[in-house]
Amino acid sequence: MKEKIIREVSKFNNELKLQGFKAFQIEDDGAETRTYSRKEFYKICLTTGKSKIHYSDKTYEQEGTILFFGNPHIPYSWETISTTYIGYTILFSEEFFKNSERSESLQQSSFFKIGGTPVLKITEEQRGFLNTIFQKMIAEQESNYVFKDELIRNYISLIIHESLKMEPSENFEQNKNASSRLSSVFLELLERQFPIETTSNPLQLRTAQHYSKHLNVHINYLNRAVKEVTGKSTTSHITERIITEAKALLQHTDWSVSEIGYALGFDYPTYFNNFFKKNTGTNPSSFRLAEV
């Protein structure tokens, strides 16, 4: 039974990566919904049940039907409280949705921003309409229709446009310790940038400014929160994690020092050498030779 589940999960992930999207019914595939990488895929979820969703510095406690928008670059957690939980989910990559001419404006909508509204309360009438859209997506992804990708994108856009007409959920509470929550979000986002698996996709978030912009908070607020909770600065955490990754790449890959530096976001080898030596006391080449 365990091997069968592993095979099904592997098939699910392969299909998701191959197609760039995957729609499914939660009551049928509930166990599988926890296996995809939020680092790669956006999520729109229509669910009925009781749950708690921790998102940024807010906690949404919901009972009934909701529509949830998950951004892969914003860490969040979901607690299912109900013994029964039903609904639908569509996962899609940024690359898949970018083929839509309207994708840029939609992905900048309030639903996917950290300070936005990721949870909408859904009426029975709205639920019936959205159920139909999700069912159409599930049916369409199994079809041989030549333009089904474009049709799926249109369905996603339709869900987003319909959501823009709805009132946001007011059933949330501010986290009692906003600094702790923001610090946790930052640290989880930092960890999600690793490991570096290819030189063709270099590290994008390298500075405290990058993270504050990505999290849509002022740099001073982020620095203050992280320092208050961890005792270390935002920059210190980023530096330590990059150095840890650099050491791993030097030890366990055959990439050149220049390639490793580029993969870690340094435009020139000299910048990487100086950064590594400043924080370790030795240069990358010497470290590699010492570890052999």
Image (tube, helix red, strand yellow):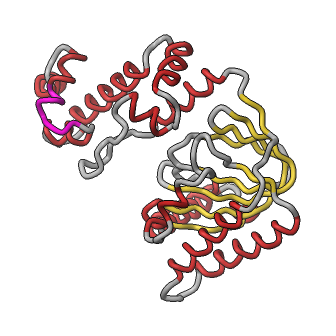
Please state which of residues 210 and 259 is positioned toward the viewer in this rendering.
210
Q: Residue at x 17, y 19 (%)?
A: 277
Is 57 on the left-hand or right-hand side of 244?
right
Residue at x 16% of width, y 29% of height:
271
Q: Is residue 270 magenta?
A: yes
191 vs 96, nearest the viewer: 96
- The number of numbered badges drawn on the structure is 0
Q: Is residue 86 above or below residue 51?
A: below
Q: Quadrant of residue 153?
A: bottom right
187 lies above or below 164: above
Residue that appears at 57% across and 60% down: 9
The vertical placement of 245 against 114, above or below, is above
Return the x and y of residue 267 as percentages of the image width and height.
18, 39
Q: Residue furthest bottom?
A: 145
Residue drawn 49% across the image and 11% down it? 231
Q: In this rendering, would 68 be left or right of 109? A: right
Q: Return the residue nearer the eye: 102 or 262.
A: 102
* Magenta span: 266-273
